[in-house]
Image (cartoon, rainbow, N blue to C red):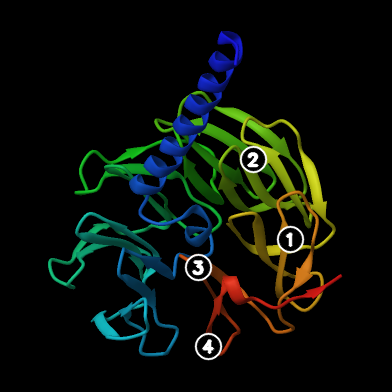
Amino acid sequence: MTKKTMLVLLILILFVNLNAAYAIDEDFERGNSVGNINNWGYYASTDDWIYYSSFSQAGGLYKIKKDGSEKTKIIDGHPAYINIKDEYFYYSDGWKLTRVKLDGSDKQVLANSAFHVNVKGEYIYYTNNGYQDGFIFKMKTDGSEKKQLNNDHASQIVVSGDSIYYTSYYNKLIKVDLEGQSKKKLLTGKQINDLNIDGDWMYFNFNQKLYKMKIDGTELTKLSDDNPKFINVNGDWIYYSDVSKKQNLVRVKKDGTNRAEINQIKSWYISIVDNYLFFHDLSKMVKLDINKIETNNE
């Protein structure tokens, strides 16, 4: 092997390791995955436990071991956008930004209006005023240093890497840094929603079709004519509810190939925890083992 070849191999190995380290660091910093949060964040996990918000009328935040044992109610309420950071839950309940310890003690309200709650590092990012019409705010996880980051309306936000991506009135896709600066409009259209970011790519609903685009705004690519809702990404696959048909659960490869229908029932609020996929069929939550999914291929 020549010195030049060895140098190229070393550079490639270093590049792969740096990207892997960045991905691990990004996951470690987050309170929940991008896909789960933008599907209302009803599920989250730690090493041993799955935490979820009950859809029953009584509600409640529960935990259960990953083997299905030791189901335990932690607190009352109807938490959404559940994040876990250090020893605390951060979530929105009655649209109030709340934090509480993992054992249910020391409950504190940090803000009176909060949607799209994203915890990353030592900060909380969220919108206020309404699900589709608010401004982006940032505060420390202890509730201090609250700061408004933008002056236009944010309909949905994703916090990833050193940037915030958001839709404004669902027809403009905008990127800013974590201080709300360096604003850049990436895309305009009749409809832009259900944002999800995985690595250098963004997956989303653009004009009622499934698209992907680089996070710098380049390489906009249509993946499917389906009208996707509740998009979530895991491994090589994109999962979503196909609103253009029965709102049933569908998956497709990240390059748009191998589209397959997983079921024929309404499948909302798609969450992915480890190797399990959860969705709501309007009467109950359904759990699927991703490794054992049987599909009807097109």
Mark 3 sits on what residue? 275
Mark 2 sits on what residue? 173
The image shows residue 37 at horizontal and vertical percentages of: 47, 59
Q: CA distance from mark 1 to mark 4?
A: 25 Å
Q: CA distance from mark 3 to mark 2?
A: 31 Å
Mark 1 sits on what residue? 252
Q: CA distance from mark 4 to mark 2?
A: 33 Å
Q: Nearer the observer, disc 1 or disc 3? A: 3
Viewed as shown, does residue 149 lie left or right of 106? right
Viewed as shown, does residue 78 lie left or right of 229? left
The image shows residue 38 at horizontal and vertical percentages of: 52, 58
Q: Nearer the observer, disc 3 or disc 2? A: 3
The image shows residue 249 at horizontal and vertical percentages of: 69, 74
Name the amino acid type tagged 2.
Leu
Q: Quadrant of the C terminus?
A: bottom right
Mark 4 sits on what residue? 284
